[in-house]
Amino acid sequence: MAKAERTIEDRLREEYFDLLPVIRRVAQQLEAEIKYHLLTISRGLSKYERLVVTSRVKDCESAVQKLVRGLEGAPAHREHPERYSLTFLKDLAGVRVLAFPRRRLIEIDSTLRKKFHWKPDPIVGDGEVLAFKYCGYGKASQKIKGEYQIVSMLTGLFWEVEHSAMYKPDPELRGVARHLGMEQRRKEVLQALKGFEEQFETLLQEGENV
């Protein structure tokens, strides 16, 4: 009986676990560097302010499926799977910087841009920037890119819940993320969170000016 040929997904899964130690090292290095560069801001926070830096490594299936989806417009990739690599992805190793209130985001972004000089790739929704995002090669590897995001803490925490509930659900719930009603509710939540932060900062400013 002829041995079944490995699929592109099989090859990419094997590559993922070969790369995993390097991906983890990139994420850990990037997290440590960002925390170090933000020490001055962290130490100057008021009691009501928050700044949290966390790293994450993209899991195997998410990485494989993202790359394969990106290749759907290139029909030849199934015939030549050896040409494709997970190193094409920009977000195998990532760091997210969450801050509250929103006015801290510009200060954090300015500080990190002076240190990393990476290519900007902001997350945009409804014509406005929802998060600053950058990717590039760091000290830990010239093979695996790192990515960092700077986002409002309220928005970032909502995204974490949304991602777990809507983008990695049980198979029977996969249509939820694409439902028009859920998309509208999502926009309303993001606007409400932004409104809360803006009102908080307005009242805070008024109090400081008294």
Image (cartoon, helix red, strand yellow):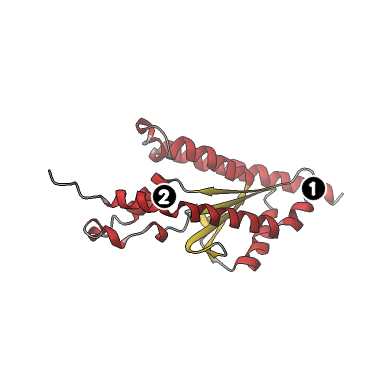
Name the residue tied to disc 1.
46
Picture coordinates of residue 40 (x, y %)? 76, 58
Q: Nearer the viewer, residue 32 or 39?
A: 32
Q: What is the number of callouts on the image?
A: 2
Q: Is residue 28 visible?
A: yes
Image quadrant in which you'd find residue 180: top left
Give the CA separation, mark 2 to mark 1. 43 Å
Residue 62 located left or right of residue 77: right
Picture coordinates of residue 88 (x, y %)? 40, 61
- What residue is drawn where x is 54% and y is 48%? 56
Q: Farthest left residue?
A: 1
Residue 78 located left or right of residue 129: left
Q: Callout 1: helix, strand or loop?
A: loop
- What residue is drawn where x is 45% and y is 41%? 183
Name the residue tied to disc 2.
17
Picture coordinates of residue 44 (x, y %)? 79, 53
- Closer to the N terminus: mark 2 or mark 1? 2
The amino acid type of the residue labelled 2 equals Phe
